[in-house]
Image: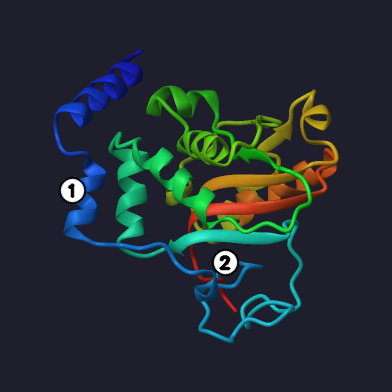
Amino acid sequence: MFAFLRRAVTALLDALLPSPITLALAETPWQPDTVHAYCPRCGSSAGFGAVKADGCSRCVGQRFPWARVTRLGAWEEPLQAFVGAMKYRQHWAWAPWFGTHLAEALRLDAPAAPVVVCVPMHWRRRLERGYNQADLMAEALAKTRQWPLAHPLKRARHDPKQMSLSRNQRLLHARGAFALRKNAARQIGGRHVILVDDVLTTGATLRQCARLLRRAGAASVHVAVVAAADRRK
């Protein structure tokens, strides 16, 4: 209830005052990356001509459960501040704004319209925050491109916030953290899936979700994130 009231008050203030997005972009102008600024296999930053058919120097020879990554930028300022405001300061309006920009950035080879899916949030975390930013992003992306939205995944347990975990802890906590809903195969079986989240860091969360989606019969998985951290070589 309190989270809902906070969100309602924030929406009212946004209607009366300049939005946090307008103020943030006025202070720190920012533009999304072009497709040549990063590796489409792992999402890491890459110079022009540095990405080959089998990836960049950070991911060549590695296998991923997704076919492609689309990002808006690197995991650095000002995106770190924008995402932080979205997740921890109740500036939830960033989520549909990011979702709309991801819809514009996506380039697909799929023959049919894909299904948009978000990384789920545990109900306790959602109650605390009042919203799942990945869900709001996915809704905006799906609406912009007029693609169907599905929720075949669920959060199986309530874990500590990812920012408090080391790389190895994130990899361990991702195991078994997600599960398929009973009707998952009916929602996405044989369909191409756009998997939406805010940040790709270690990739542990998105790997687990993508594997589950493939297990449920997804023809392919395409990851769409606001920001991606450069992978360790």
| Three-letter code for the amino acid on which mark 2 is drawn | Gly
Residue found 72% across the figure and 34% down from its top: 179
Residue found 22% across the figure and 47% down from its top: 22
Camera-side residue of 15 and 188: 15
Q: Which mark is residue 23?
A: 1
Is disc 2 placed on a helix, strand or loop? loop
| Three-letter code for the amino acid on which mark 1 is drawn | Leu
The quarter of the picture where the C terminus appears is: bottom right
- Horizontal placement of 231 versus 66: left or right? left
Horizontal and vertical percent position of residue 161:
46, 42
What residue sits right under mark 2 in the picture? Answer: 43
Horizontal and vertical percent position of residue 228:
50, 62
Residue found 52% across the figure and 57% down from its top: 105
Quarter of the image where one finds residue 149: top right
Whether residue 201 can be seen here: no
From mark 2 to mark 1, how far is it between C-alphas? 28 Å
Tell me if residue 65 comes above or below residue 218 in the rendering.
below
Tell me if residue 170 comes above or below residue 228 in the rendering.
above
Tell me if residue 211 comes above or below residue 57 in the rendering.
above
